[in-house]
Image: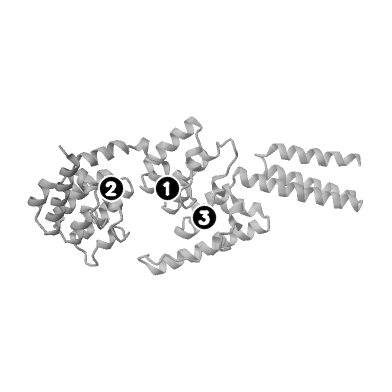
């Protein structure tokens, strides 16, 4: 028996029934998953035909659940499914938008809720369990508990490659999490896991193809002082990093959320954000790392920057004093430096010892 010829006949019968605008009871017996993946001579799938001929909602649901991949397949004009979404808020339009988003985000359980259960959908659910989804997809779904669970397992295995993976725009899962308003605890966990990298890569230094670091995205998409402080504490250099258009994170702080319900609150947030970013950029430009620590709290990264800056300044000051042969001033400088180092840099005892040793050695000069 010529099975291919029989399938062609079935496909043609299905297409003819759809284009005739038949009801669900007439179309349903002709529908098979294998037929719904076949394009006609015009490169339209049966779902496209059903939408074009304004079949009833139950028919659209039937075709989506039997071939959900059709939601992202282009039609003969290489357009996506949204060209069939009406300007009016019809039931079919809502169904298409929700189904499309559910498919793209791998929310196949939601597709079942929208369109009903089918073997193809159950197979998709089975193939896309939490463990099989990438960290980036979990962030795209905003499934933050699942993201935290994945990060916990990555940390236990000291496996960091997944956290450094980049999408088509060059962004990491952290970049997506920042833009999608992930909880602060999730961002902290991502930074901790990335810090286990043996190659010493810094996830906060990975930019998108537009040159945006996570700090740029934080300044652009959200105003959360805790998030900005977290990113600056761990990568202060990002304050002066520029996009391909020459914009620092501070430039993005001028953007107001036009969708905000309360315009006054939105502009107040912009003012606060601009003020904070300006203070941070100014402090970093002046190498005033103590000011950065005051704004963002203490972190090993800022302590190292401050320690190095203070050590260089101290050495230069003492050398100048020695050159002027003013011993009393040397003693005065030594006392002030020792007090400052002991009060600020207790966590960096190695650097404190280095400088104390250096100052002690001056007695022999």
Query: Of 285 and 289, which appears nearest the observer?
Result: 285
Image coords of residue 308 (percent x, y): 71, 46
The local secondary structure at tag 2 comes to helix
Image quadrant in which you'd find residue 364: top right
Instruction: State which quarter of the image contains the C terminus.
Output: top right
Is 12 situated left or right of 273 in this image? left
- Count every numbered label the image shows and give the total: 3
Q: Is residue 31 left or right of residue 162?
A: left
Q: For this view, does 283 lie left or right of residue 4?
A: right
> Which mark, by number, is residue 209?
3
Task: Determine which of the numbered discs, if any, sits on residue 69 in the image.
Answer: 2
> Left of 113 or right of it: where is 329?
right
- Tell me residue 61's x, y (percent): 18, 51
Sequence-wise, the earlier of marks 1 and 2 is 2
Residue highlighted by disc 1: 183
Front residue of 302/100: it is 100
Q: Nearer the viewer, residue 207 or 23?
A: 23
Q: Nearer the viewer, mark 1 or mark 2?
A: 2
Pair 3/1: label in front: 3
The percent position of residue 88, horizontal first and vertical second, equals 22, 67
**Contact, mark 1 vs mark 2 (Cβ under 8 Å):** no
Helix, strand or loop at mark 3 = loop
Of pointers 3 and 2, the one earlier in the residue sequence: 2
The Cα atoms of the two marked residues, 3 and 1, are separated by 25 Å
Distance of label 1 from label 2 (alpha carbons): 32 Å
Q: Residues within 10 Å of mark 3 (few under 14, many from 20)?
A: few
Residue at (27%, 52%) from the top-left corner? 71
Other residues around mark 2 within 10 Å, as few (<14) / some (14–19) / many (≥20): some
Secondary structure found at label 1: loop
Pair 3/2: label in front: 2
Q: Residue at x 16, y 61 (%)?
A: 54
Q: Residue at x 55, y 59 (%)?
A: 249
């Amino acid at each position: 028996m010529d099975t291919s010829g029989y399938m062609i006949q079935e496909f043609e019968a299905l297409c003819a029934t759809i284009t005739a605008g038949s009801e669900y009871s007439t179309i349903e017996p002709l529908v098979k998953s294998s037929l719904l993946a076949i394009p006609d001579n015009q490169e339209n799938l049966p779902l496209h035909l059903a939408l074009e001929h304004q079949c009833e909602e139950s028919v659209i649901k039937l075709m989506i659940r039997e071939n959900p991949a059709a939601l992202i397949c282009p039609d003969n004009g290489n357009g996506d499914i949204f060209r069939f979404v009406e300007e009016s808020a019809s039931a079919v339009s809502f169904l298409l938008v929700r189904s499309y988003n559910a498919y793209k985000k791998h929310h196949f359980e939601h597709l079942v809720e929208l369109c009903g259960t089918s073997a193809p959908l159950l197979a998709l659910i089975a193939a896309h369990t939490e463990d099989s989804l990438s960290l980036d997809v979990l962030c795209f779904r905003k499934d933050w508990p699942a993201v935290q669970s994945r990060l916990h397992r990555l940390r236990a295995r000291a496996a960091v490659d997944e956290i450094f993976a980049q999408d088509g725009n060059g962004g990491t899962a952290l970049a997506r999490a920042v833009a999608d308003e992930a909880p602060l605890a999730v961002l902290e966990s991502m930074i901790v896991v990335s810090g286990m990298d043996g190659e010493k890569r810094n996830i906060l230094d990975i930019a998108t193809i537009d040159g945006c670091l996570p700090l740029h995205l934080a300044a652009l998409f959200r105003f959360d002082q805790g998030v900005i402080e977290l990113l600056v504490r761990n990568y202060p250099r990002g304050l002066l990093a520029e996009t391909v258009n020459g914009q620092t994170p501070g430039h993005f702080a001028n953007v107001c959320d036009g969708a905000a319900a309360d315009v006054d609150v939105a502009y107040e947030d912009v003012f606060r954000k601009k003020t904070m970013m300006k203070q941070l950029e100014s402090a970093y430009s002046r190498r005033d790392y103590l000011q950065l620590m005051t704004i963002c709290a203490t972190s090993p990264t800022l302590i190292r920057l401050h320690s190095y800056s203070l050590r260089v300044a101290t050495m230069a000051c003492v050398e100048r004093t020695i050159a002027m042969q003013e011993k009393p001033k040397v003693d005065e400088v030594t006392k002030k430096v020792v007090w400052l180092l002991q009060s600020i840099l207790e966590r960096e005892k190695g650097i404190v010892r280095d400088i104390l040793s250096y100052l002690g050695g001056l007695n022999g000069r």
